[in-house]
Amino acid sequence: ETFNHFIERLSFIDLSLKGNMQDDYSTTEEERFRVRKLEISDKSKGFIELLQQLTVCDSVSEKEFQERFQELSLYGDDHLICVIEDDGSGKIVATGSVFIEKKFIRNCGKVGHIEDVVVDSCVRGMQLGKKIIGFLTDHARSMGCYKVILDCSVENTTFYEKCGFKQKEVQMVKYFI
């Protein structure tokens, strides 16, 4: 009986240690990949190159970046661009944005529009996209939005469904360039 008790305690200690090791790992990952607002210095950390993995994004000069950054800053919390910087490499590895549309319908309600979500191909599968979407939807909710919407490719619908979104209606577009 004493021997069985010893084995049970040893198993409990082993499980406790494994739990702590996993906690340490996830804490380390949390610290390595934190979501934050875009900073003016992020251009030099690969922000534009990351956007080029999403869509057409020509090179942006330092002056153009600074001017657009300042312009967007004027919107305050009504236009938020967030990033995840890999603290290990100093590189921006994920981004997304949300802007708040003020409406007359729904008692002068607000809608959050999520745009330009991309995760660097080198770190996909690490749940960073979910972190970005969570950050953006939390921001929209905190701004009093009654809903948050986004457009995505058919290939990405499963990802967004896992983030709590559902398909609704049809997207239409008319390009001017």
Image (spheres, helix red, strand yellow):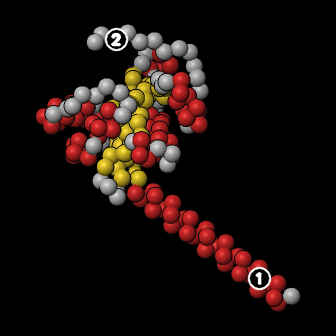
Q: Does any portion of residue 137 appear in the rendered image?
A: yes
Quarter occupied by residue 37: top left
Q: Which residue was labeled with disc 1?
A: 7
| Location of residue 124 in the rendering, given as x and y in whole percent from the top left corner | 47, 44
**Marks 1 and 2, how far apart at CA:** 69 Å
Quarter occupied by residue 10: bottom right
Q: Which residue was labeled with disc 2?
A: 175
Residue visible at 82% across and 90% down in the picture? 2
- Nearest the camera: 95 or 139? 95
Quarter occupied by residue 97: top left
What amino acid is found at the position of numbered circle 1 in the picture? Ile
| Location of residue 127 in the rendering, given as x and y in whole percent from the top left corner | 51, 46
Q: Residue furthest left?
A: 63
Q: Secondary structure at mark 1?
A: helix
In contact (CB < 8 Å): disc 1 and disc 2:
no
Q: Residue 72 vs residue 16: left or right? A: left
Q: Is residue 4 above or below residue 27?
A: below
- Please tell me how crowded label 1 is: few (under 14), some (14-19), or many (20+) other residues with Cα within 10 Å: few
